[in-house]
């Protein structure tokens, strides 16, 4: 079961640990991603879950990585309940390994990280930063430090096996709360330089709490634990709402031509077909505003 854990050290470090291997494997199966694309999408999915875990219940975060590399766009949205979904514009991207690793930075290229936080009723928060490396973790840390003024260390990792399946995915994030002693921050910076990649920890079977312990090397009080899963709330009734939003004239046009409206969900690939009879129903049951 995929899990995200939150904890706090006595020195004032907020620590988050995540293992979401099954979630990222599900994303791979839905989108048919090739290894480099699987790693990129997996890191954005994991990053969105880590960011969402700092939000309140009715809030949500969207991450969009828009680069000039072959992947073009990677998108994920997550909520603090551990629900996440995402897609990559070009799922069939596979680059040569770089330094024996999947070349996510090369597949992303230069561009921007756009973050949208829906704050449940309040005006959403938008932030954009230039991609630093395109490797996602560094870009998220840079976003948090510059756009939100929350200094953060972020590590993300995805391991793709020779059969193309995702064998490990997850990450951790550390944020010093205001008032954390300088020597703790120095200690953390030095320690994180020597900590092994998080994908290696997950391959060895470590859970989120063990990852957090290995990352910071200080006693952690665990304060919250959230189940994580790939979840898409799309449904026929939501598709009907979207079709209604096309407007009366467009729907009448479909009916006149005897055509169905066909929609495939970007996030879960569910296929919806609204036939002309259903369109007639929709036309009757919708309150149309005079234009
Ligand atoms: Zn869907």
Image: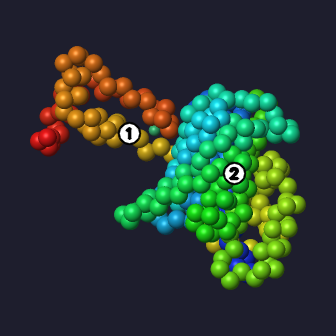
Residue 33's x, y, as percent? 64, 31
Residue 173's x, y, as percent? 69, 62
- Identify the disc placed on residue 235: 1
> Of 227 and 132, which appears nearest the observer?
132
Residue 188's x, y, as percent? 80, 70
Pointer 1: residues within 10 angstroms few (<14), some, or many (20+)?
Answer: few
Element under label 2?
loop
Colour scheme? rainbow
The residue at the point 39 percent across, 63 percent down is 123
Element under label 1?
loop
Q: Earlier in the sequence, mark 1 or mark 2?
A: 2
The residue at the point 77 percent across, 80 percent down is 182
> Of 67 and 206, which appears nearest the observer?
67
Discs 1, 2 touching: Cβ within 8 Å: no
Q: Is residue 200 above or below residue 271?
A: below
| Quadrant placement of the C terminus | top left
Residue 138, quarter of the rendered image: bottom right
Examine the rendering and report whether any part of residue 6 can be seen.
no
> Of 248 and 166, which appears nearest the observer?
248
- Identify the disc placed on residue 132: 2
Residue 257, quarter of the rendered image: top left
Label 1 vs label 2: CA separation? 37 Å
- Identify the disc placed on residue 195: none
């Amino acid at each position: 079961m995929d899990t995200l854990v939150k904890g706090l050290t006595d020195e004032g470090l907020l620590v988050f640990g995540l293992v979401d291997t099954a979630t990222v494997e599900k994303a791979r199966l839905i989108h048919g991603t090739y290894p480099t694309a699987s790693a990129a999408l997996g890191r954005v999915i994991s990053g969105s879950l880590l960011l969402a875990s700092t939000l309140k219940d009715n809030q949500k975060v969207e991450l969009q990585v828009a680069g000039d590399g072959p992947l073009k766009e990677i998108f994920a949205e997550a909520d603090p309940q551990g629900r996440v979904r995402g897609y990559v514009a070009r799922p069939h991207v596979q680059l040569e390994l770089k330094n024996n690793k999947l070349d996510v930075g090369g597949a992303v290229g230069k561009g921007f990280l756009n973050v949208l936080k829906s704050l449940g009723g309040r005006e959403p928060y938008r932030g954009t930063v230039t991609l630093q490396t395109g490797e996602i973790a560094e870009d998220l840390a840079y976003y948090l430090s510059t756009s939100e003024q929350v200094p953060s260390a972020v590590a993300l990792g995805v391991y793709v096996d020779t059969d193309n399946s995702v064998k490990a995915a997850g990450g951790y994030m550390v944020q010093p709360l205001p008032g954390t002693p300088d020597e703790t921050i120095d200690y953390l910076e030095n320690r994180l330089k020597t900590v092994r990649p998080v994908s290696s920890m997950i391959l060895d079977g470590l859970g989120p709490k063990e990852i957090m312990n290995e990352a910071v090397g200080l006693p952690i009080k665990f304060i919250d634990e959230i189940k994580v899963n790939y979840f898409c709330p799309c449904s026929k009734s939501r598709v009907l709402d979207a079709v209604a939003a096309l407007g009366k004239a467009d729907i009448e046009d479909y009916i006149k031509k005897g055509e169905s409206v066909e929609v495939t969900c970007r996030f879960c690939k569910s296929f919806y077909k609204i036939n002309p009879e259903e369109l007639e129903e929709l036309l009757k049951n919708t309150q149309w505003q005079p234009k």
